[in-house]
Image: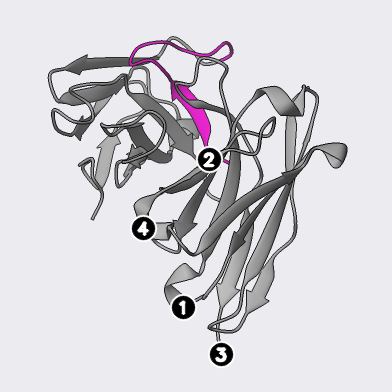
Amino acid sequence: QSVLTQPPSASGTAGQGVTISCSGSDSNIGSNSVNWYQHLPGMAPKVLIYNTNQRPSGVPDRFSGSKSGTSASLAISGLQSEDEADYYCATYSEPYWKTPNGVVFGGGTKLTVL
Amino acid sequence: QVHLVQSGAEVKKPGASVKVSCKASGYNFATYDINWVRQPKGQGLEWMGWMNPDNGKTGYAQKFQGRVTLTRDTSINTAYMELSGLRSEDTAVYYCAREARTGTHFDYWGQGTLVTVSS
């Protein structure tokens, strides 16, 4: 059972948009920024969004992140077939610095592009 | 260019220990914390702990306290994760990941090491 709750699956038509949610609590999402990782089968995870809404260089602006209270969202616009992957949200759990409840992940959302 | 290259797949018997390595290149190894994350088959990502390569300081997820040990050899820019008392539920892909300078996320990941625990 993951600390952060994500829908197990999501889907969207190529060219359309989709939003993946991540629900937590005051002690994790409510207190910290959120990161999103994309995980393709057989590959290393890759950071898509950090600090809730920042994109690393090289990540298309089709990907965006937001947060409200104890929930966060990853929005993907203009879906492409290569976006088919597992997506994980992650944050820190208070008290954090630097461990006691450490880094927490969502259970992951498998995105299918129709 | 930053690279984290991990050691190869392992098969271990229940009760044994495994030690996975993560060799860093392309940056100053001592200045970025290394974290370890695993993915059991069919499940999501699970954080295990972190290590400061400069001073060797570590922190472990409560679930793995007493069973995991993170170490490093700065002479060869390599971090290690050792997990003891292996059980079948420890069958997973284990990843090392570099923590960004801001300390907010993992910016580079190793390719993963499959550890299979089977009698």
Q: Quadrant of the N terminus of chain A?
A: bottom left
Query: Which residue is denoted by mark 1 in the rendering?
Result: B88
Q: Are marks 4 and 2 in contact (CB under 8 Å)?
A: no
Residue depth check, mark 3 versus mark 2: number of the one nearer the observer: 2
Chain to which mark 3 belongs = B
Q: Amino acid at mark 4?
A: Lys
Q: Amino acid at mark 2?
A: Trp
Residues beneath discs 4 and 1 located on the same chain:
yes
Residue drawn at x 64%, y 68% is B18
Distance, label 1 to label 3, CA atoms, is 9 Å
The colour scheme used to paint the residues is one colour
Residue A17 in sight in this render: no
Chain to which mark 1 belongs = B
Distance, label 4 to label 1, CA atoms, is 16 Å
Residues beneath discs 4 and 2 located on the same chain:
yes
Query: Which residue is denoted by mark 3 in the rendering?
Result: B119
Q: Amino acid at mark 3?
A: Ser
Displayed quadrant of residue B84: bottom right
A107 sits to left or right of B71: left
Image vertical order of residue A90 relative to residue B23, above or below: above
- Mark nearer the N terminus (3 vs 4): 4
Residue drawn at x 46%, y 62% is B66
Q: Is residue A50 magenta?
A: yes
- Mark nearer the N terminus (4 vs 2): 2
Residue farthest to the right, as pictured: B75
Distance, label 4 to label 2, CA atoms, is 14 Å
Where is residue A28? Give x, y as percent.
23, 30
Query: Which residue is denoted by mark 2 in the rendering?
Result: B50
Chain to which mark 4 belongs = B
Distance, label 3 to label 2, CA atoms, is 30 Å
- Mark nearer the N terminus (1 vs 3): 1
